[in-house]
Image (cartoon, rainbow, N blue to C red):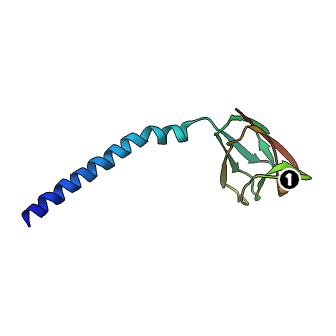
Amino acid sequence: MKTGNIFQRKYLLTAALVLTLMLVLSLPLILTSCGTGGAKVIMKNLSFDPVEVTIKKGETVTWTNEDKRSRQVMSGAPPVMTDDFMSPVLQSGESWSFTFNEPGDYPYHDMRIPNQLARIVVEE
Ligand SMILES: [Cu+2]
């Protein structure tokens, strides 16, 4: 009974140590993964602001709908749609993010508003 307790305490101590170590080691990874560049696009007055955004490969763009009506982002410039990315329908106040892992030129539009074109440029 007593040896069992000692074993348990040692085990718990080791587990706590391992968990702490894992947390400390992964901290820089967590910090860098959410701290690097990227861009924000505000959807307001039925348009995109800014209309053109340049980021680096691997960075994330976050769209936020500040219009009263719902909005929906989709890659491509009508009538040519592409399947690179498409947000869900974003209600007023909602945000959506997409990470661009391939360099390139990404025109996009709003599915619900005609003639609202914008562009993401992803550099190497
Ligand atoms: Cu569309």
Image location (x, y in percent) of residue 99? 66, 45
Image location (x, y in percent) of residue 9? 17, 56
* Ligand 1 quarter of the rendering: bottom right
The residue lying furthest to the right in this view is: 79
Residue at x 21%, y 51% (from the top left corner): 13
Above or below, 72 relative to 38? below
Above or below, 52 relative to 73? above
| Disc 1 crowd, CA 10 A, few/some/many (<14, 14-19, 20+) | some
The residue lying furthest to the bottom in this view is: 1
Q: Quadrant of residue 8?
A: bottom left
Relative side of 26 to 73, left or right? left
Q: Quadrant of residue 23?
A: top left
Residue at x 77%, y 38% (from the top left corner): 104
User: What residue sits right under mark 1 in the picture?
Assistant: 81
The residue lying furthest to the left in this view is: 2
User: Does the beta carbon at disc 1 come under 8 Å from ligand 1?
Assistant: yes
Above or below, 90 relative to 57? below
Q: Assign a secondary structure to mark 1.
A: strand
Image location (x, y in percent) of residue 1? 8, 67
> Looking at the figure, which quarter contains the C terminus?
top right
Residue at x 84%, y 49% (from the top left corner): 76
Residue at x 80%, y 48% (from the top left corner): 45
Q: Amino acid at mark 1?
A: Met
In-front residue for pair 7/89: 7
Image location (x, y in percent) of residue 16? 27, 51
